[in-house]
Amino acid sequence: MADMMTINPIAFAQSLIRCPSVTPEDAGALDLLTTTLTGLGFTCNRLSFGDAPNGPVDNLYARIGTGQPHFCFAGHTDVVPAGDLAQWSVDPFAATISDGMLVGRGANDMKGAIAAFVCAAAAKINQGFKGSLSLLITGDEEGPAEFGTVKVLEWMQAQGELPDHCVVGEPTSARRLGDMIKIGRRGSMNVHITVLGAQGHVAYPDRGDNPITRLVRLLNELKQKTLDTGNAHFQASNLEVTDIAVGNHIDNMLPATARARLNIRFNTEHTGSELSAWIKQVVSDHAPRHELDIRISGEAFLTQPCSLSDMIIEAIKTETGMMPELSTTGGTSDARFIKAVCPVVECGLVGLSMHKVDEQVPIADIEALSRVYKAILDRYFV
C-alpha cells in the first residue's frame, strides 16, 4: 500500500485539474484516481452508463473494507467548460499556483475536495480502522446527471454496497472554510410553456387569437402567487421566468405561438408533483390550446441534524475554529439522489469562484480541508 506521506493534497489536486474533464469527458481523471486508490488498497469498479448524446459517462466506485459502519465520500471529477480562454490569467488546465492560490477549472468545484479526501483516507488507512470506506465519483454531475450518481447507486444497491452515511465534497463554505455545510437542498423544476393561438391581422383581433395575451396572463398568475414563506430550515420557494419568446417580426400580425420558460426552486413545503398539478391547471385555465413540458430535476430534502452532522461540526470546529451554519441554500447537487439511501451532508471548500474565470482556492484551504476530513473519519470510525 502507498504510504500516506506520498499523497500530497495540493499535488494531487493539480494532477486532477490537469485532466480537462469537461462533462462528459473523463480525460484521465478517473484513471488517476483509480491508480491512486488501488495503491491504497481500495477495490475499484469503473462503471460506464448511457449512450450518446449524453453518454457514455464514466464513473468510479471504490471501497476498502467489508464491515460496518460504511462511510462514503461522493463527488465528481467533471467540470464546466473554461469559457473564453482569453479572459483567464493562466491556462485553466495547467493548475498554476500563484500567491498561495491554486488556479484552474475545478479547483474548488470539486477536484480540490477530492484530493483532500484521498489524502485523509490514506492517513486513516495507515492508522487502521474497522468498517468500510468508499468513494462514489461521477463524471456527470455538471451535466444532465442522468448516467452518473443515479446509475451508480442502482448498481451499488444491486451489489449490496449501499453506505450507512455519506459526505459530499461540494464547495459549501460561503466566505471562510468551514463556515457552512449543507444538510439539505431545495428542489428544482424547469417548465417550458407553448401557448397556441391563431395568426391574424392586428386590426381584427376578434378574428385571431393572440397567444401573447394568454401567456402574459398565465405568467402573471403564476408569479403573483406566494408559494410559501419558508420554514425552519429553508428559505422561501421562488418561481422565476427565465425566457419569453415569440419571434414575430411583423408589426401588424398576431403571432400563432408564444413560448416561455421558468424555473421553480422549492422547499419541503412542496413536492414536484403538487407544483406540476398547479402549473397545469393555471396554464389550462388561460390557454386551452397549449404544449407543456415539466421536468423535475430534484425534490427538496432535509437531513435532520444527527450524529453525522454533529461529527462534521466538531471536526470543523477543531480544525478551523469555525462554527458552521447548517444551510439548505444554493442549487442542486448529487446529494439529492444519495439522500434516498442514507443520511448525507455536504462539506467542502469555499465556492466563491466556482464556474468563474480564474477559478481558484487557497492551497492552505485544501490542506485544512484534508485535516477536517481526517477528523471526521477519526470520529466516525471509533
Image (spheres, rainbow, N blue to C red):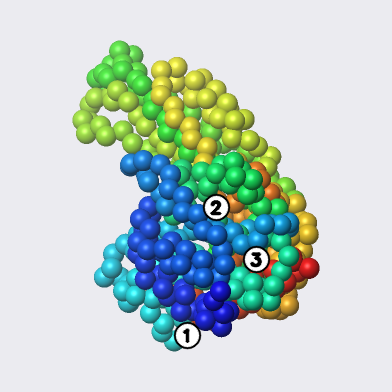
Q: Quadrant of residue 247?
A: top left
**Residue 310 appears at what percent x and percent y?**
77, 64
The answer to whether residue 332 is above or below residue 64 is above
* Badge 1 density bin: few <14, some 14–19, many ≥20, Cα 10 Å: few
* Badge 2 density bin: few <14, some 14–19, many ≥20, Cα 10 Å: some
Could you tell whether 199 is left or right of 13 in the image? Answer: left
Which quadrant is the N terminus positioned in? bottom right
**Mark earlier in primary sequence (3, 1):** 1
x 42%, y 33%: residue: 192
Looking at the rendered structure, which numbered label has been put on residue 208? Answer: none
How far is the residue under mark 2 from the one under mark 3? Answer: 15 Å
x 78%, y 68%: residue: 382
Q: Amino acid at mark 3?
A: Met
**Residue 217 appears at what percent x and percent y?**
47, 28
The answer to whether residue 115 is above or below residue 346 is below
- For the residue labelled by badge 2, is the local secondary structure a helix, a strand or a loop? loop
Which residue is tagged 1? 100
Q: Amino acid at mark 1?
A: Gly
Which residue is tagged 2? 333
How far is the residue under mark 3 from the one under mark 1? Answer: 23 Å
Tag nearer the camera, 2 or 3 = 2
Which residue is tagged 3? 180
